[in-house]
Amino acid sequence: MNAIEEKLNALKEVYVPGLDARKKDTFPALDPVNFVYKVDVPLLPDLLKAEDGRSFYPCFTSMAQVPEQYKHFFLWVAVPFREFCAFAVKSTICHEIIIDPFTSSLILPENMVVHYSGLEAPASDEAEPKTEA
């Protein structure tokens, strides 16, 4: 097991930014599978886009990893890491996750997200997580 796998296996909870999805006028046509629920509040997680057009659901290992200016734009929920992976697998919007995008930037491709979710789904070609410099 490499250092990245050890870190992912030890990760229990992540912090997820999003918008309150109860505002039906803002999100009228989205399938509820695209929401993270915490205490009955549906949250539409933020999406980050790479220069190549790929989208990622961001999550953070601690609130200390979140830049101050980013914190105030969103509602935040703490969810179990594997539950967040399962959410991404089921989402109709995006299936990849980026952990701590403003610091260590660990990208989990779809096959790794599926692995950590405990669900079964077709895996993409990428087999290894990537760290961005």
Image (cartoon, rainbow, N blue to C red):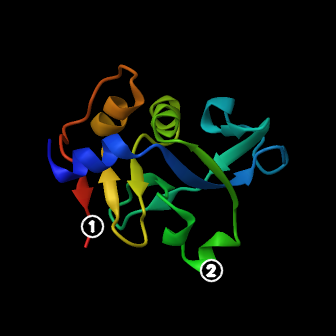
Furthest residue in direction top, as rendered: 120
Q: Quadrant of the N terminus?
A: top left
**Where residue 41 sits: x, y (%)?**
78, 41
Q: Compared to 51, does 91 lie above or below? A: above
Q: Nearer the viewer, residue 113 or 82?
A: 82
User: Is residue 4 shown left or right of residue 103?
Assistant: left
**Where residue 30 sits: x, y (%)?**
68, 37
Q: Which residue is mark 2?
A: 69
**Where residue 70 sits: x, y (%)?**
61, 73
Q: Compared to 52, does 39 lie above or below? A: above
Label 1 residue SS: loop
Furthest residue in direction front, as rendered: 10
Q: Which mark, residue 132?
A: 1
User: Is residue 33 shown left or right of residue 72?
Assistant: left
**Where residue 50 sits: x, y (%)?**
38, 64
Residue type at numbered disc 2? Gln
Q: Nearer the viewer, residue 24 or 76?
A: 76
